[in-house]
Image (spheres, rainbow, N blue to C red):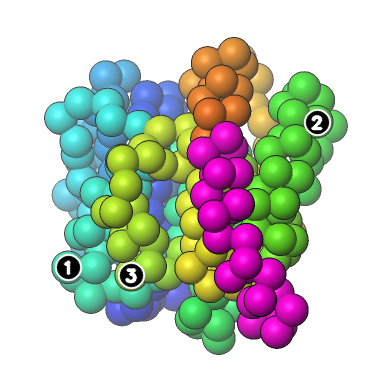
Amino acid sequence: MQASSSHLVMIPSYNPGPKVDVTVREARACWNPVWVVIDGSTDGSAARLHAMAAADPGLRIIELPENRGKGAAVLEGLRAAAAAGFTHVLTMDSDGQHPAHCIPEFMQVSARNPGCMVLGKPVFDAAAPQLRVKGREISNWWANLETLWMGIGDSLFGFRVYPVAPLERIMARQRWMRRFDFDPEAVVRLAWAGVRPINLPAPVRYFRSDEGGVSHFRYFRDNRLLTWMHTRLFIGFLLRLPRLAVRRLSGR
């Protein structure tokens, strides 16, 4: 297990089912510290996580009183991380889909490139729902247009390392990025702020319900949210286009 005073693993968690126990144990086997931000869970997982933390000084639990959304949970964790002196956080989902064994590699790349964001580029297996695999290509295309193709490998994959200060600053300025729109909007706005993306492949696994898999994705609700998000980002892109073009032409 590797320990760090600058980089921590942050796991936002909302009604994840039993997979969260495995996720946290696997993350702790690879990194210290690990923080879990419980986003108003009502499935009994909070009690189990608190019990795990009571026996593990490398695990910290932050519990929100009600469900606020992934982005809001991450922001709560960012503020606590900044207050504790951490400079970078690796976010990963609590449902077991993300590869804990990749944590050390992502952290090492981040430590060598502290001004960058390290983005996971998902490697799907045969169980991945094709509707979601194909659908994310649309979001990826828009994210790359909105950043003039700065190199965002995947806009939706939540396994990534963020520099704390610029992300916290961006989120504090506006009221968006609080729910399912967090992951793609975060990378676009960080790219606008000059935070360069580095892409690393990472396997992702989708679990069936009989395997303990839990999904809070709702096709129409969340795609409507993404459509509104890309609409406002495209407007922001047009306003920033001259500056982004100059940056791209100068290679910065």
- For badge 3, the amino acid type reads Ala
- Give, as a single range, the part of the protein colored magenta: 230-252
227 or 24: which is nearer to us?
Answer: 227
Camera-near label (1 vs 3) is 3
- At a point 51% along the width and 39% down the height, the residue shown is 232
Q: Residues within 10 Å of mark 1 (few under 14, many from 20)?
A: few
Viewer can see residue 196:
yes
Q: Say whether residue 25 is left or right of residue 73.
A: right
| Residue carrying label 3 | 165
- For badge 2, the amino acid type reads Lys
Q: Say whether residue 17 is left or right of residue 229.
A: left
- Alpha carbon separation for disc pair 3 and 2: 33 Å
Residue 125: x and y in percent read 80, 38
Q: Secondary structure at mark 3?
A: helix
Residue 168 lies within the magenta run: no
Residue 143: x and y in percent read 66, 48
Q: Are marks 3 and 2 in contact (CB under 8 Å)?
A: no
Residue 158: x and y in percent read 55, 47
Viewer can see residue 101:
no
| Residue carrying label 2 | 134
226 or 236: which is nearer to us?
Answer: 236
Q: Are marks 1 and 3 in contact (CB under 8 Å)?
A: no
| Residue carrying label 1 | 83
Residue 249 lies within the magenta run: yes
| Lower sequence index among marks 1 and 2 | 1
